[in-house]
């Protein structure tokens, strides 16, 4: 598997994974049929490249209700194109298998009932070969539709396919994080990709200052692609603040552990303390301590000692909040994070196209003292709850269930991670998870009042 991903990272020729969909940078009106077809082939090919070296058994693993099997991700992303594009715009389309609408529907109640999410690993049939055939059938029909779609429906098609491609890239990221969770339960700790050690020393934290302002928050209405939850762009007062020049490193979090951070209720939110007691958590996900007191962590390159210089990853919002309080700081709001990301000339971290699927070193990647390495290393928890922006309206119909109905009880993360496709890392991108969630590549960046 590592060899396959290394090949893609070097050339991008197998799938085009090294470049985001060109249609994301264009208005729907300016997308050509050839551009859309090329983007479709590349994104769909990138998903298939992730299965190189994975057995049928690997692809059907499910280790917890929140994670889905690789095979299910492959089928669901095809179901998305079938249900929202082919069923609507291809008059000659007949479902490959009517049962797939039940098996591979994730949460779209407007489409129909769904097979229970916690039991997706029980769907041994259709098998991997059948899912591959399903993907091929959808691909052939989609490419033909892009070529033959009447001009009167072209804008609808381009809009839906562009959404479907970005949706599939989200599932590519989930393939990585879900499979890592599955493999972590194997006592052999199997490697799946190359995860080189960081090396070097950790840069000291600089506090980057930002003056009070009335900021424009959210994606601009310029025709370029964004998810609906990034809109509408709106004005917001952001008081003066300071942001750490880099995310928290493993060594800094070790100090929190050794200082009794997991045993001090004064550091924790009430819900966080309850979660802590119920779960028995005493370290980040994938960390374990041996009989000699040494800390180890599972990476997709296998089990190895915790490197104090590496970026901390796989912590919950509750842990991030407690650490920030212990450190005499706080988590940034998502508006503060976006102001910072929009104000600096940032260099992306180790994005998914590199195929390493492990954060880079916890330095600030500074060249002139202005950058803060906000993009593409670890998702960074913010202090903001996931809620609609002022004036937000979900799209009509089932496709409107994409983001809007989840705007409660979750927290926003920003920045993208080492498993995020490059086309998704932008200052306005809003990710969201429940406070206890840790299996995503989630880390911590500190903020404080000016």
Image (cartoon, helix red, strand yellow):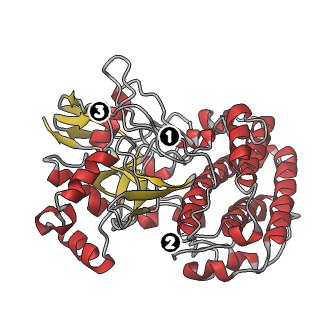
Q: Secondary structure at mark 3?
A: loop
The residue to which callout 3 is attached is 245
Foreground label between 3 and 2:
3
SS for dot 2: loop
Q: Residues within 10 Å of mark 3 (few under 14, many from 20)?
A: many
- For label 1, the residue is 425
Q: Residue furthest front?
A: 292
Which labelled disc corresponds to residue 32? none
1 and 2 marks in contact (CB < 8 Å): no
Compared to 423, does 403 lie above or below?
below
| Whole-percent x, y for residue 163 in the image | 62, 51
Foreground tag (1 vs 3): 3
Which picture quadrant has residue 207? top left
Q: Residues within 10 Å of mark 1 (few under 14, many from 20)?
A: some
Q: Is residue 264 left or right of residue 399?
A: left
Circle nearer the N terminus (1, 3): 3
Where residue 126 sits in the image (x, y, percent)? 79, 77
Name the residue beneath numbered marker 2. 66
x, y percentage for residue 253?
A: 27, 51
On the rendered structure, is 336 left or right of 20? Answer: left
> As rendered, which of 107 and 425 lies closer to the eye?
425
- The residue located at (54%, 59%) in the rendering is 177
Bin the neighbour count of mark 2 within 10 Å (Cα to Cα): few under 14, some 14-19, many 20 and up: few
| Residue 158 position by quadrant | top right
């Amino acid at each position: 598997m590592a060899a396959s991903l290394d090949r893609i990272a070097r050339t991008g020729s197998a799938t085009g994974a090294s470049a985001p969909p060109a249609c994301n940078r264009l208005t729907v009106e300016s997308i050509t049929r050839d551009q859309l077809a090329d983007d479709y082939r590349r994104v769909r090919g990138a998903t298939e490249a992730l299965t190189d070296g994975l057995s049928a058994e690997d692809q059907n693993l499910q280790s917890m209700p929140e994670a889905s099997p690789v095979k299910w991700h492959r089928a669901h992303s095809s179901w998305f194109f079938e249900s929202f594009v082919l069923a609507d715009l291809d008059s000659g389309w007949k479902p490959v298998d009517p049962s797939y609408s039940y098996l591979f529907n994730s949460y779209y109640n407007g489409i129909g009932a769904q097979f229970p999410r916690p039991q997706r690993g029980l769907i041994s049939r259709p098998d991997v070969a059948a899912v591959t055939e399903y993907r091929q059938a959808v691909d052939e029909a989609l490419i033909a539709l892009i070529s033959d779609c009447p001009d009167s429906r072209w804008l609808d098609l381009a809009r839906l396919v562009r959404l479907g491609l970005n949706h599939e890239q989200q599932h590519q990221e989930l393939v990585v994080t879900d499979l890592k969770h599955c493999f972590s339960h194997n006592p052999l700790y199997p490697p799946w990709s190359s995860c080189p050690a960081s090396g070097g020393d950790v840069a000291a934290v600089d506090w980057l200052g930002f003056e009070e302002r009335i900021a424009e928050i959210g994606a601009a209405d310029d025709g370029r692609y964004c998810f609906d939850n990034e809109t509408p762009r709106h004005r917001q007062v952001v008081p003066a603040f300071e942001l750490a020049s880099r995310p928290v490193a493993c060594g800094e979090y070790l100090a929190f552990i050794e200082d009794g951070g997991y045993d001090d209720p004064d550091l924790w939110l009430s819900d966080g303390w309850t979660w802590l007691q119920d779960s028995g958590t005493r370290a980040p996900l994938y960390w374990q301590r041996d009989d000699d007191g040494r800390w180890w962590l599972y990476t997709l390159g296998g089990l190895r000692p915790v490197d104090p210089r590496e970026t901390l990853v796989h912590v919950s919002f509750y842990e991030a909040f407690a650490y920030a309080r212990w450190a005499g700081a706080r988590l940034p709001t998502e508006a503060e994070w976006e102001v910072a990301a929009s104000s600096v000339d940032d260099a992306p971290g180790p994005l998914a196209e590199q195929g390493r699927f492990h954060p880079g070193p916890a330095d600030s990647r500074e060249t002139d003292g202005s950058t803060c390495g906000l993009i593409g290393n670890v998702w960074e928890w913010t202090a903001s709850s996931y809620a609609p922006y002022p004036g937000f309206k979900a799209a009509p119909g089932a496709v409107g269930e994409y983001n809007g109905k989840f705007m409660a009880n979750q927290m926003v993360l920003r920045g993208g991670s080492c498993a995020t496709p490059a086309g998704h890392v932008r200052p306005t991108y809003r990710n969201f998870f429940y406070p206890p969630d840790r299996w995503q590549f989630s880390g911590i960046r500190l903020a404080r009042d000016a």
